[in-house]
Image (cartoon, helix red, strand yellow):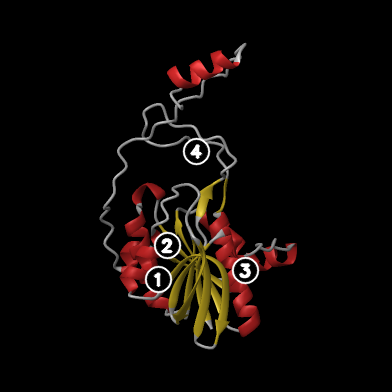
Amino acid sequence: MKILVTAKRVTDPDAKIRVKPDGTGIETAGLEYKLNPFCENAVEAAVSLVEQNGGEVVAVTIGDDSATINLRTALAMGAERGIHVKASDTELDSDLTARILAKVYEDEKPDLFILGKQAVDGDSNQVGQLVAEYLGLPQACFASKMELNGDRLQVTREVDGGLETLDLSLPAVVTADLRLNEPRLPTLPNVLKAKRKPVDVKTPADMGVDTTLKVVTVAYEAPKERAGGIKVKTVEELVDKLRNEAKVI
């Protein structure tokens, strides 16, 4: 069984993000990056399926040169090899990302493509669905459980009303939710092995992908700082402020 899995580099969600004074982007000096948490779940799911059924896990990332570091994390978790499509984050939108990943899928022809549900930097939650649409494949999003039965995959997903179980024929596209599993921590020997695992470097041009963007970011703006709280002396004063100032009642 061959499984393709995403390994997107994202800014550390615990880091303090600062917008450039001219609004053209964020300050990158001293900013730390990590493997997208949802992609960690996707990698864990892929590696676990291959451990149980045999096969190969191929991890793919799109980003600049430094994205290789986080791709190596996926390799240390158990992926056999990596694919690095070189492109700057400023040159991407969800649609272009999906078209690049769809092309990688066509080249690799895996039995299953598992993506993180969303990236914690953009939070768009669009790429998995777009990939499935471009490829014409069955899809199951927000997976919290997966079971492989022969050439079919049962996926339990979280919906507003509870849980829904889908039965998919393979090949298929699945997006992983945080409750799907507990990602393993790479051991030191596996981290060292990951440095020797092959990574195929490509560009969108090499792959024949049109890089025209459908969404263009005009500017960035930091959210307004929250004002400090105040103390009130009576319940009546509290109700008055909630009604007339905060306007929440």
Q: Name the residue under label 2.
A: 85
Q: Dot 3: few (<14), some (14–19), or many (≥20) neighbours within 10 Å?
A: few
Which amino acid lies under the numbered mark 1 shown in the image of this protein?
Val
Q: How crowded is mark 1: few (under 14 residues within 10 Å), some or many (20 or more)?
A: some
Q: Which mark is residue 196?
A: 3
Which of the marked residues, 3 or 2, is nearer the chain's N terminus?
A: 2
Query: Could you say which is closer to the camera, residue 177 or residue 242?
Result: 242
Q: Nearer the viewer, mark 3 or mark 2?
A: 2
For marks 4 and 1 on the same chain, the one whose residue lies earlier in the sequence: 4
Q: Disc 1, disc 2: CB below 8 Å?
A: yes
Front tag of 1 and 2: 1
Question: Looking at the image, which is closer to me, 198 or 166?
Answer: 166
Q: Based on the displayed image, in which of its 4 quarters is residue 138 positioned?
A: bottom left
Counting other residues with Cα less than 10 Å from the Cα at mark 4, is it few (<14), some (14-19), or many (20 or more)?
Answer: few
For this orientation, the residue located farthest to the right is 188
Residue 71 screen position, x and y as percent: 55, 61
Which of 240/177 is in front? 240
Residue sitting at x 74%, y 62%: 188
Amino acid marked by disc 2: Val
Above-or-below relation of 207 to 13: below
> In the rendering, which numbered label is found on residue 28?
4
Q: How much space separates mark 1 and mark 2, taking CA atoms?
A: 9 Å
Instruction: Give the side of residue 160 with respect to residue 192, left or right.
Output: left
Look at the image and tell me whether residue 197 can be seen: no
Labels 4 and 1 touching (C-beta < 8 A): no
Question: Quick check: marks 3 and 2 in contact, CB under 8 Å?
Answer: no
Residue 229 in the image: x percent, y percent?
Answer: 57, 19
